[in-house]
Amino acid sequence: MLKNSVLQIRKLGKRFKSSEKGATAIEFAMVAFPFFALMGVIIETGAMMFTEYGLQAAVQEAARTARTGSAQGANKSAADFKTLICKNASIGASCTSNLVVYANSYTSWAQLASNMPSFISIGVKDDGTAGASAYKLGAPVCPSSLVATYDWTFTMPLMNYLGNIKGNTARRLVGFAMFQTEPYPSSGGSAC
């Protein structure tokens, strides 16, 4: 009886060893996590790049209103500019809370080049304090800059190689425009 049991176990072992049923499921289980993780990284990278492109286009559109003097004539506030950029960028519900607008006017292009802060320093710093801020649209014929930053927090855990803020858990996206305001009619004087 014991000998029959041992023979049956050996036969069962040989059958199990030569069987290929379920091999596809096991192979898929081995590659499923890396495959879906890679797909998630690709999708999030694409969404992030699309958002940055939309932000850049929205900043260019908002800068056009400052360049022509229509924003100054309408007394647009920083909040109005933020709303305009968010509307044109189509970022989503978190736009107004994560978007920082920096607008400044200078007396010369050299002053703009030497005083323009890095986009990493515009917005909330890693320690939670406020970064560089300004809102001065500029008088006629003045070199000006408009920068909008949006902090994209990663959802995929493997994205930190693209991070540049918050311990590489987020990326500061930026849209910027540098321009000289046109000689629009101004009631407030013409000094830069």
Image: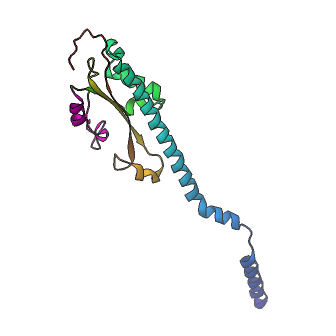
Horizontal relation, residue 180 to residue 93: left or right: left
Residue 69 visible in the shown view: yes
Residue 140 included in the magenta stretch of the image: no
Q: Which quadrant holds residue 71?
A: top left
Q: Is residue 114 above or below residue 155?
A: above
Q: Along the line of sight, which residue is nearer the eye, 98 or 66?
A: 66
Horizontal relation, residue 180 to residue 90: left or right: left
Coordinates of residue 138 in the picture (x, y in percent):
27, 21
Residue at (41, 50) in percent of width and height:
162
Residue 94 visible in the shown view: no
Residue at (23, 11) in percent of width and height:
188
Q: Along the line of sight, which residue is nearer the eye, 23 or 150?
A: 150
| Quarter that holds the N terminus | bottom right
Q: How is the image coloured?
A: rainbow
Residue 127 included in the magenta stretch of the image: yes
Q: Along the line of sight, which residue is nearer the eye, 57 or 86?
A: 57
Q: How many marks?
A: 0
Region of the chain picked out in magenta, as a range: 108-133
Residue at (27, 11) in percent of width and height:
186
Coordinates of residue 46 in the picture (x, y in percent):
51, 43
Coordinates of residue 185 in the picture (x, y in percent):
30, 10
- The residue at the far top in this view is 187
Coordinates of residue 94 in the picture (x, y in percent):
43, 32
| Quarter that holds the C terminus | top left
SS majority, magenta? loop
Residue at (42, 24) in percent of width and height:
61
